[in-house]
Amino acid sequence: MSYFADRSGAVSSNGRDLGLQVQGDFLKNAAGRNLIHYQVGVFNGQGINTKDLDQRKDIVGGVWVMPVEGMRIGVFGSEGSYARQEKVTDATGATHNESRSLPQHRYALSAEYKFSDWTVRSEYIHSTGKAFKTTYTTGADATKTEVNEAIGNKADGVYALVIAPVIKQKLYAKARYDLYRQSGHWGDSRTQYEVGANYLFNKNIQLNAEYARINDRTLASHNYDMVDVQLDFRF
């Protein structure tokens, strides 16, 4: 739901929202490995560099269970709101600011298993809560409070991926299925079928190549293809 843009219309999330989080691990097994990880936090809820308009904080938390080495099974939740403020003129001609707040309720279920240089991972996420019609890109957008009724108040998404070693710690094949439904219906779903490979020259340099077939039902022409090649440097 939230990447560089959020369904609610919030400011681009290329940073961090202000808040306070507590996290930790407990319940060690006989080998001394923790079986449970938890995290819970209270956040501003308006996005990066944006003050809280409705004075309602977001509460975000999750729990990972790690029954065997390399496996994590998690459940996460988020309760909060996203608000905007517009100038309103009353019957006397006086102008004042009025906030409009849209509740946002979200949860996710996820699992990951890493074993013998393999990675298998999947996640499902669900959102309940309406969205503003205009996405926040400039300061003027913060006063646009019209709700996007066309996409309703439900959305969900799921992905599953496998990364398999061809040459251990050197060459990997990968496949991924990715689905997002902006209103919880198949009529506006976007599905991505992806295959690719990663090649590690050394621990600091990696080449990634991916081919994806996209089916986007919000477009007049649903299907198109993408090829992506990246060279990563770590230092």
Image (cartoon, rainbow, N blue to C red):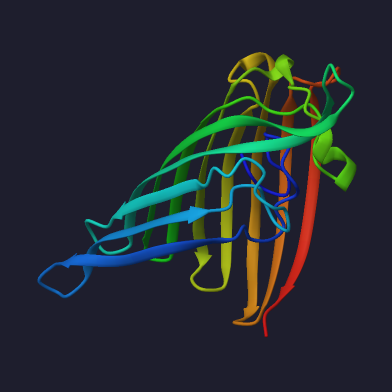
The picture places residue 35, in percent across and down from the top left corner, at: 22, 61
58 lies left or right of 181: left
Residue 54 in view = yes
32 lies left or right of 140: left
The picture places residue 223, in percent across and down from the top left corner, at: 79, 26
Q: Which quadrant of the structure image shows residue 26? A: bottom left
Residue 12 vs 49, above or below: the answer is: above
Q: Nearer the viewer, residue 147 or 124?
A: 147
5 lies left or right of 122: right
The picture places residue 182, in percent across and down from the top left corner, at: 65, 26
Q: How many marks?
A: 0
60 lies left or right of 129: left
The residue lying at 89 percent from left, 41 percent from top is 140
Q: Nearer the viewer, residue 122 or 203?
A: 122
Residue 91 vs 13, above or below: the answer is: above
Q: Which quadrant of the structure image shows residue 224? A: top right
- The N terminus, quarter of image: top right
- The C terminus, quarter of image: bottom right
- For this orientation, the residue located farthest to the left is 30
Q: Nearer the viewer, residue 29 or 139?
A: 139
Q: Which quadrant of the structure image shows residue 68? A: bottom left
- For this orientation, the residue located farthest to the front is 92
The residue lying at 81 percent from left, 40 percent from top is 142
Residue 138 in view = no
The residue lying at 65 percent from left, 42 percent from top is 194
Q: Nearer the viewer, residue 87 or 227?
A: 87
